[in-house]
Amino acid sequence: MWGLLVFLAVAVGLYIFLKWRFGAEHVNGHVPEVRNIPERYTDPVCGLSVEANKGYGTMYKGREYRFCSLRCLADFDADPERYVHSTGA
Ligand SMILES: [Zn+2]
């Protein structure tokens, strides 16, 4: 009986620990990824590649997207989910 309770407590603790750790890793692992990104972005609206220091950028859900023109940026702003989902990622 007590063995089962201890097992449950350990299992719940482990679950919370793993969940917390996975979340922390996800955030921490994202930072070097951002530093290593190439100097080019893909315009999610028209698919053209855009250099990091050119075009127009916007942040959406913590990620930077760049666009070849204001037209593409406006299209993205109008319905970001459409383009975010179409690129997969
Ligand atoms: Zn474009």
Image (spheres, helix red, strand yellow):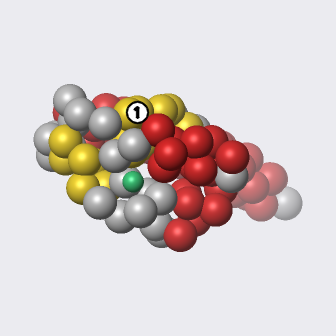
Crowd around label 1: few <14 · some 14–19 · many ≥20 (10 Å) = some
- Residue 3 in the image: above or below residue 24: below
- Residue 48 in the image: above or below residue 76: below
Q: Quadrant of ligand 1?
A: bottom left
Which of the pair 20/34 is nearer the observer?
A: 34
Q: Is residue 43 left or right of residue 18?
A: left
Residue at the disc numbered 1: 57
Q: Is residue 35 left or right of residue 25?
A: left
Which of the pair 32/38 is nearer the observer?
A: 38
Q: Which quarter of the rendering shows the C terminus?
A: bottom left
- Going by the numbered disc 1, the residue's amino acid type is Gly
Residue 21 in view = no
Coordinates of residue 27 in the picture (x, y in percent): 44, 35
- Residue 63 in the image: above or below residue 89: above
Coordinates of residue 78 in the picture (x, y in percent): 69, 46
Q: Which quarter of the rendering shows the N terminus?
A: bottom right
Q: Residue at x 29, y 60 (%)?
A: 48
Tell me the quarter of the picture where residue 20 sits.
top right
Q: Residue at x 47, y 38 (%)?
A: 70
Residue 49 in view = yes
Q: Residue at x 77, y 60 (%)?
A: 4
